[in-house]
Amino acid sequence: MSNFSNNLVNNFPEYLFNKINTQKLEARKDGRDVIDLGYGNPDIPTNPLVVDKLIESARNKKNHKYSVSKGIVGLRSAMKERYKRIYDIDLDEDKNIVNTIGSKEGLTHLLMSVLDSGDKIVVPDPSYPIHHFAPLIAGGIPIKIKCLDTNQFLDDLIEILKTTKIKVVLISFPHNPTTLTVTQDFYDRLVLLAKAHNFLIINDFAYSDVFFKDQRPPSLLYSDRELTHSVELYSLTKGYSMAGWRVGFALGNKEAIQALTKLKSYIDYGTFQPIQIASTVAINDLDSYPQEVSEIYKERRLLVVENLKNFGFNIFDSDATMFVWAKIPEFYKKKSMDFSLEILKNSNVAISPGVGFGNHGEGFIRIALVENKQRIRQAMKNMQSYFDDSM
Ligand SMILES: Cc1ncc(COP(=O)(O)O)c(C=O)c1O
């Protein structure tokens, strides 16, 4: 028998969320109504103006041809203006911005564009799974740093830099899964380190628009306005609730952006042009939509936090993201995977075990706020009944 898969892919560790997913699908096959707070797949619809623009543009046969892999100029200019309007950062739409197929694809191809085989890259642990895998796909060596406290993260990075040559430091704030946020001062300190040790910082900024107080999460690029050591990945997925549209951007350092643009020009012909045109409308005309979306997540968050506190969980406080990150109380005496499987089995609620995001996520669970308030209330009731019965 031939083996048509290579070692790289074969050696990927098991995707830990598969266990939960398999059980969730089995439960649904048995007719059980599983409330899915596991998978971070936004349930809020895309703004109707964007959908209308997509339909209108799709009717125009000129838009049926191949588009451009780096993104149409109108789309890149819309991002340039957005960064100026919101963060007061100057970008050149040709040199510093490239359209990506969401930030996930953007990150993977960016790392393939900037890492040589064997280059070392710092990755936070816990983190969104592609942060662990993209470095491997790109041939890099991930150096994982515990990320449950942002100051500690910087201190640990400083220690590593004393002995190890690092090519890239990957970060992502506001952070999935821990919901940690940072201030501009964090980026100022990181950029100083990047200049001293000559590494590229990549900030996966997928949650830039999901925040609950007046304080908008800062951009890394503001701390590196000459764009010598920084790239940010921006996405319409969360803030504009456009997950399935697959629209993101890489922005910043021109050598890194040009390398990614070049690689992408070999690989793809760009996102379907009507999607790019409709996304341009979202970026130019709908600054207030992410605030409406955030308001919905904020209310859901309050509901979950209140209940989990009653169940004895310690919650990471946060004013951003669409998640709740909570420490499993000692008295449950369970590791995060067993705990999550038990909740699924006994309460029909799917949640994510912290260990799925990395070893330092052990002992925690992540709840994604992707069902409406009524369903979340039901989920909390189901969990309450199970805890009452089992204690
Ligand atoms: C940190 C982080 N980055 C990227 C993504 C995926 O974003 P996109 O849809 O833009 O690929 C997610 C989705 O959950 C995420 O949590």
Image (cartoon, rainbow, N blue to C red):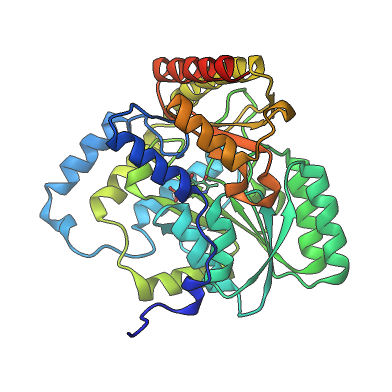
Please, which residue is most extreme toward the bottom here? 2
Q: Position of residue 268 (x, y in %)?
A: 33, 68
The quarter holding residue 177 reads top right
Please, which residue is most extreme toward the front here? 390
- Quadrant the N terminus occupies: bottom left
Q: Position of residue 387 (x, y in %)?
A: 58, 19
Q: How many marks?
A: 0
The quarter holding residue 181 reads top right
- Along the line of sight, which residue is nearer the eye, 259 or 332? 332
- Along the line of sight, which residue is nearer the eye, 138 or 283? 138
Residue shown at 81% from the left, 71% from the top? 164
Residue shown at 65% from the left, 48% from the top? 126
The quarter holding residue 148 reads top right
Residue 236 appears in the rendering:
no
Residue 389 appears in the rendering:
yes
Q: Position of residue 163 (x, y in %)?
A: 86, 71
- Along the line of sight, which residue is nearer the eye, 338 or 110? 338
Vertical placement of residue 273 versus 341, above or below: below
Vertical placement of residue 288 versus 196, above or below: above
Residue shown at 46% from the left, 63% from the top? 94
Vertical placement of residue 241 versus 123, above or below: above
- Along the line of sight, which residue is nearer the eye, 118 or 268? 118
- Quadrant the C terminus occupies: top right
Decide if residue 176 is on the left or right side of residue 312: left
Residue shown at 58% from the left, 72% from the top? 114
